[in-house]
Image: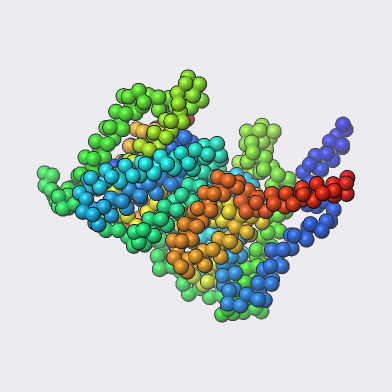
């Protein structure tokens, strides 16, 4: 094999799988979540703030999917970046500039920077130690937000956040329609970035690091830097989600930094299915809707339902809801194949 | 004098942390399971004891013992059903399943007992001050120190001086070798898990005056229990006692001396310590 041939084979292996695939009708499925969101925008009167909340949590869960799902960074402190983004956006709007897009960018940058700094400190550890360090970071952020009352409002929360119209054109209305579209656009941009990143050689190398860190190190991958880079990206994304919640609800509470928040977002991700990007969509949507319905009866009923679901999913359905969908689709396809359509493909 | 008060407060607090967390160090050290549901067993114990004392008028110590038995039994049941399949899985499934278990316990207890914080059950005989030479000090806290010391001694006897303890330490150090020489490691898992959960239930019951019982108890104090295990070194019994006392004292001192920082000091110290010694202060031989 000549060098050039070798290079092309390598390229083929590393090339984004989606791009090398020719168009097929199945790809239209990728439009489904966005079509649903747009239909919801037109028919979901009265539920737009719930919808915005779902979009925010999808973005948050998607950010965790990058760090936890793809890079295998075991973290229980992702709320640190969600909360940091929320507080950054709120404080930016109150003290500097009420423009939502500027606030969003500032919050994203700050959360990303915090992810970079903390990631550089902790990402040489693995397993339970890493888990504890992420917990400790979130706890430190929580304590800072709790005690810096002059800046964050402490346990009263940060209120008085002003938001000017998006690009000076679209005013945030009382019903949350603008907020919904705004959140949807931000989610779409981040989704594209996430999809490109996980299919890039960089994303693939993180797949390798997750599966066998030692081997990746042995073949010369700068493991620590790759992990730090992915962690920062994920933190920036979580910060964006936090900023969206600050701007759409005009309120930031300490609960954005709680352990429970970190836990819940992991629950959403696994409920939907990790390492699938769309898992975050399904998991977050179902979680928020179930919480809204069951929570109106008693907040503890949804805890029971979600807890029970988690146990069942971990024990019996490891791929989450997306995994169940996949296996059903595979079965249906198998049946179709068995009934004489096998010949078509070959 | 204030220093001594802080020290005593810290030690009594640390003893409660030790009683609850010592079982967790076994689950995480021996079974290699990230167990976030350990606080739930302490919560079960605390709730059962409180309900027994308040509703049925059962004496304080007896109700704490009943709580320990029930928490241990439920722990055994959980080990056999949901924990056993977890040993072969990665950290993420472990984290999620045990969070799920936590949620179920929180929801279950709240549905039965109610969603308000429970009053602390300190019997009248302990709810007074006693003279300890230089000042008077709450009898309840002295009681915690004594009980904690006695339990630490018993745990030490079992772990360091009994055949079972020798096997347990061997299994922590090298589970594969322990299996290879014919030890029934699985049964050891079940027995120690029951013991750990019983201790947690007992600690949750008698420690309710220090760690108040409320609906989110299982998650709120979980961080402390995990810190004890991580700082002490996973699977290290001595380590968990040292860590629990140190954390009790540091946290109490921090809140006394610089109240404006709250728990900040503790978390920063833990963060620094784990960066400096990722395997904790006194890790067992297998890790060190």
- Colouring used for the render: rainbow
- Please tell me which residue is depicted at 49% across the width and 38% down the height of the picture: B84
- Residue A218: image quadrant is top right
The percent coordinates of residue A216 (x first, y second) are: 66, 36
**How many numbered discs sit on the rendered protein?**
0
Residue occupying the point 27% across, 36% down: B151
Q: Nearer the viewer, residue B211 or A345?
A: A345
Residue B233 sits above or below residue B219 on the image: above
Pick whichever, B11 or B106, lies toward us: B106
Q: Residue at x 55, y 46 (%)?
A: A314
Q: Residue furthest front?
A: A339
Res B229 visible: no
Q: Residue at x 40, y 42 (%)?
A: B75
**Looking at the picture, how far across and down is residue B263, in whole percent?**
37, 53
Q: Nearer the viewer, residue A270 or A224?
A: A270
A237 or B160, nearer to the observer? B160
**x then y, percent, for residue A248:** 56, 71
Using residue B241 as the reference point, say whether residue A295 is left or right of it: right
Q: Is residue B131 visible?
A: yes
Which residue is most to the top? Answer: B181
Tell me residue A194's x, y (percent): 68, 55
On screen, residue B52 above or below A169: above
């Amino acid at each position: 094999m000549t060098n050039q041939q070798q290079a092309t084979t390598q390229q083929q292996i590393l090339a984004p799988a989606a791009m090398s695939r020719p168009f097929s009708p199945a790809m239209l499925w990728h439009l489904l979540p966005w079509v649903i969101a747009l239909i919801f925008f037109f028919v979901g009167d009265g539920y737009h703030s719930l919808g915005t909340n779902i979009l925010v949590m999808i973005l948050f869960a998607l950010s965790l999917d990058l760090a936890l799902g793809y890079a295998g960074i075991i973290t229980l402190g992702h709320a640190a970046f969600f909360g940091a983004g929320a507080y950054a956006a709120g404080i930016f709007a109150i003290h500097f500039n009420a423009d939502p897009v500027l606030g969003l960018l500032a919050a994203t940058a700050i959360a990303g920077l915090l992810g970079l700094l903390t990631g550089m400190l902790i990402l040489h550890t693995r397993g339970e130690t890493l888990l504890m360090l992420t917990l400790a970071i979130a706890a430190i952020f929580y304590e800072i937000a709790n005690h810096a009352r002059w800046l964050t409002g402490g346990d009263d929360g940060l209120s008085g956040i002003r938001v000017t119209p998006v690009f000076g054109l679209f005013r945030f209305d009382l019903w949350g329609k603008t907020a919904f579209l705004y959140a949807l656009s931000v989610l779409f941009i981040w989704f594209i970035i996430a999809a490109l990143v996980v299919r890039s050689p960089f994303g693939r190398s993180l797949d390798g690091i997750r599966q066998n860190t030692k081997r990746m190190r042995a073949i010369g991958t700068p493991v620590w830097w790759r992990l730090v880079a992915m962690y920062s990206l994920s933190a920036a994304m979580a910060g964006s989600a936090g900023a969206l919640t600050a701007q759409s609800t005009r309120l930031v509470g300490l609960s954005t930094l709680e352990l429970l928040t970190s836990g819940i977002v992991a629950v959403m991700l696994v409920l939907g299915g990790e390492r699938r990007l769309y898992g975050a969509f399904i998991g977050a949507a179902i979680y928020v809707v179930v919480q809204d319905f069951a929570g109106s009866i008693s907040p503890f009923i949804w805890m029971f339902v979600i807890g029970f679901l988690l146990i069942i999913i971990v024990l019996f359905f490891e791929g989450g809801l997306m995994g169940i969908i996949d296996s059903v689709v595979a079965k249906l396809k198998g049946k179709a194949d068995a009934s004489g359509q096998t010949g078509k493909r070959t | 004098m204030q220093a001594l008060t802080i020290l005593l407060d810290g030690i009594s607090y640390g003893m409660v942390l030790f009683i609850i967390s010592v079982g967790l160090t076994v689950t995480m050290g021996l079974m290699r399971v990230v167990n976030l549901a350990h606080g739930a067993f302490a919560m079960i114990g605390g709730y059962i004891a409180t309900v027994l004392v308040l509703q049925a008028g059962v004496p304080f110590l007896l109700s704490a013992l009943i709580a320990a038995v029930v928490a241990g039994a439920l722990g055994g049941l959980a080990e056999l059903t949901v924990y056993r399949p977890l040993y072969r899985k990665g950290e993420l499934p472990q984290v999620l399943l045990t969070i799920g278990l936590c949620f179920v316990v929180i929801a279950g207890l709240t549905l039965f007992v109610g969603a308000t914080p429970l009053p602390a059950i300190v019997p009248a005989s302990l709810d007074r001050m006693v003279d300890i030479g230089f000042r008077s000090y709450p009898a309840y806290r002295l009681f915690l120190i004594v009980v904690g010391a006695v339990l630490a001694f018993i745990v030490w006897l079992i772990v360091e001086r009994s055949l079972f303890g020798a096997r347990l330490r061997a299994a922590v150090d090298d589970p594969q070798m322990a299996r290879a020489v014919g030890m029934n490691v699985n049964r050891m898992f079940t027995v120690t898990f029951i013991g750990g959960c019983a201790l947690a239930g007992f600690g949750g019951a008698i420690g309710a005056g220090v760690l108040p019982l409320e609906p989110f108890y299982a998650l709120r104090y979980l961080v402390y229990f995990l810190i004890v295990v991580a700082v002490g070194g996973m699977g290290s019994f001595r380590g968990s006692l040292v860590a629990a006392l140190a954390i009790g004292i540091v946290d109490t001192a921090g809140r006394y001396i610089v109240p404006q920082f709250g728990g900040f000091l503790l978390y920063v110290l833990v963060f620094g310590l784990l960066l400096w010694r990722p395997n904790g202060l006194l890790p067992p031989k297998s890790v060190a």
